[in-house]
């Protein structure tokens, strides 16, 4: 580990008593514990995540949100050729292009019919989302395993974006088992979704020992702020999931039923905390709903989906009803 000043945490209970002359921080302002550097590594958090995910052998690296890793993976792995399975989070192509990697895309539907097609692209890394953003579908784990073995065949890496994996725990745990089996997967997850703290920026990647050895010297210190670390330290991830998931499932089912009753087409088979749909009505729902004080996600930047597609989050029943009634008003008055 590289040496830095300000690492009072290595001294355990003495940390609060140490007069720190090792860090060159303005001593003439009293900002309390904010005057400390964050922990360089938070081993207890990494162990906590391993237990939560059911991992036996994967290495955990925490960072300030999953997007942080999306923009660093291309350089860490020195990716020259990449394959993005669509639909997908739109930052992947941006991060790869910024690094100068060659970016190809392939629809999930085509891949499902012929997983061996990956060989024709000969990518250094394949990026796939499960649950899929923005539809909420999950990718069959048998397909993930096959892709991983195809990438092993050509000496490449499979990156599985599971930003919403906490909402499908069984699928997430099975993905970890596959990663431990194949040894060439990176699983990326966001904690800001399930914990509802996007302003704190918390995420992590899970990697095998071999992948960890490739990137461990390329990660930067202090990537996660101390308030985020302390928040996670005090949070019972399993308890939050146990409370949250039944409510999400119930409200998602309600949303799907009500949207279909209004004439909207549900896209895919949503399994996360959002629902995507296609509108048959010739009206801009995003702009129209803003008049009701409601903001939804316009999916026109997803080329796979076409026009008039939108995504809505699953919220409390009272809020979901407000959205449904506003949609009813829009489509009956345009």
Image (spheres, grey):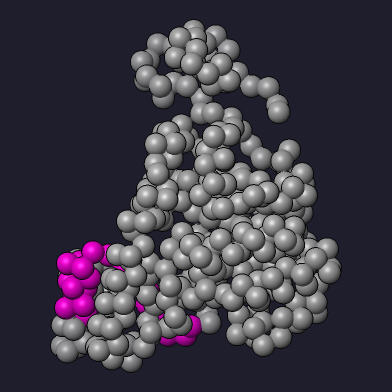
Whole-percent x, y for residue 126 in the image? 69, 67
Question: How many marks do you count on the picture?
Answer: 0
Q: Residue at x 80, y 66 (%)?
A: 152
Whole-percent x, y for residue 190 in the image? 49, 54
Question: Left or right: where does residue 251 sit relative to residue 13?
Answer: left
The answer to which quarter of the image holds residue 283 is bottom left
Question: Left or right: where does residue 65 sit relative to residue 110?
Answer: left
Q: Residue at x 55, y 9 (%)?
A: 21
The answer to which quarter of the image holds residue 277 is bottom left
The residue stretch that appears in magenta? 305-327
Would you place residue 278 above or below residue 41 in this image?
A: below
Q: Is residue 18 visible?
A: yes
Q: Residue at x 53, y 18 (%)?
A: 12
Judge by depth and name the residue closer to the eye, 106 or 170.
170
Quadrant placement of the C terminus = bottom left
Quadrant placement of the N terminus = top right
Q: Residue at x 57, y 75 (%)?
A: 139
Whole-percent x, y for residue 129 in the image? 56, 68
Judge by depth and name the residue closer to the eye, 318 or 293.
318
Question: Residue most toward the right?
Answer: 154
Question: Left or right: where does residue 101 sit relative to residue 250?
Answer: right
Magenta span includes 72: no
Q: Is residue 157 visible?
A: no
Judge by depth and name the residue closer to the eye, 118 or 52.
52
Would you place residue 261 above or below residue 87 in this image?
A: below
Question: Left or right: where does residue 228 sit relative to residue 213?
Answer: left
Magenta span includes 315: yes
Would you place residue 215 above or below residue 95 in this image?
A: above
Whole-percent x, y for residue 271 in the image? 43, 72
């Amino acid at each position: 580990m590289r040496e830095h000043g300000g690492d009072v945490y290595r001294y355990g209970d003495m940390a609060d008593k140490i007069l720190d002359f090792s860090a060159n921080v303005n001593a003439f302002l009293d900002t309390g514990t904010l005057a400390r550097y964050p922990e360089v590594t938070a081993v207890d958090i990494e162990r906590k995540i391993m237990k939560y995910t059911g991992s036996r052998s994967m290495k955990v690296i925490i960072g300030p949100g999953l997007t942080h890793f999306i923009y660093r993976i291309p350089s860490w792995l020195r990716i020259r050729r990449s394959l993005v399975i669509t639909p997908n989070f739109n930052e992947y192509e941006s991060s790869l292009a910024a690094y100068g990697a060659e970016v190809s895309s392939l629809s999930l539907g085509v891949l499902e019919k012929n997983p061996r097609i990956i060989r024709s692209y000969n990518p250094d890394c394949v990026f796939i989302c499960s649950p899929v953003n923005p539809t909420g579908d999950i990718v069959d784990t048998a397909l993930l395993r096959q892709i991983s073995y195809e990438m092993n065949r050509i000496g490449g890496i499979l990156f599985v974006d599971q930003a919403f994996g906490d909402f499908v725990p069984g699928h997430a745990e099975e993905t970890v088992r596959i990663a431990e089996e194949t040894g060439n997967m990176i699983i990326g997850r966001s904690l800001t979704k399930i914990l509802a703290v996007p302003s704190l920026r918390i995420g992590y990647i899970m990697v095998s020992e071999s992948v960890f050895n490739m990137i461990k010297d390329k990660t930067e210190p202090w990537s996660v702020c101390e308030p985020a670390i302390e928040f996670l330290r005090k949070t019972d991830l399993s308890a939050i999931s146990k409370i949250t998931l039944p409510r999400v499932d119930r409200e998602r089912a309600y949303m799907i039923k009500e949207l279909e009753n209004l004439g909207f087409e549900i896209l895919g088979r949503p399994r996360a905390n959002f629902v995507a749909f296609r509108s048959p009505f010739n009206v801009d729902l995003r702009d129209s709903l803003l008049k009701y004080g409601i903001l939804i996600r316009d999916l026109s930047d997803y080329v796979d989906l076409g026009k008039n597609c939108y995504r809505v989050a699953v919220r409390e029943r009272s809020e979901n009803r407000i959205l449904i009634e506003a949609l009813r008003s829009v489509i009956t008055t345009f």
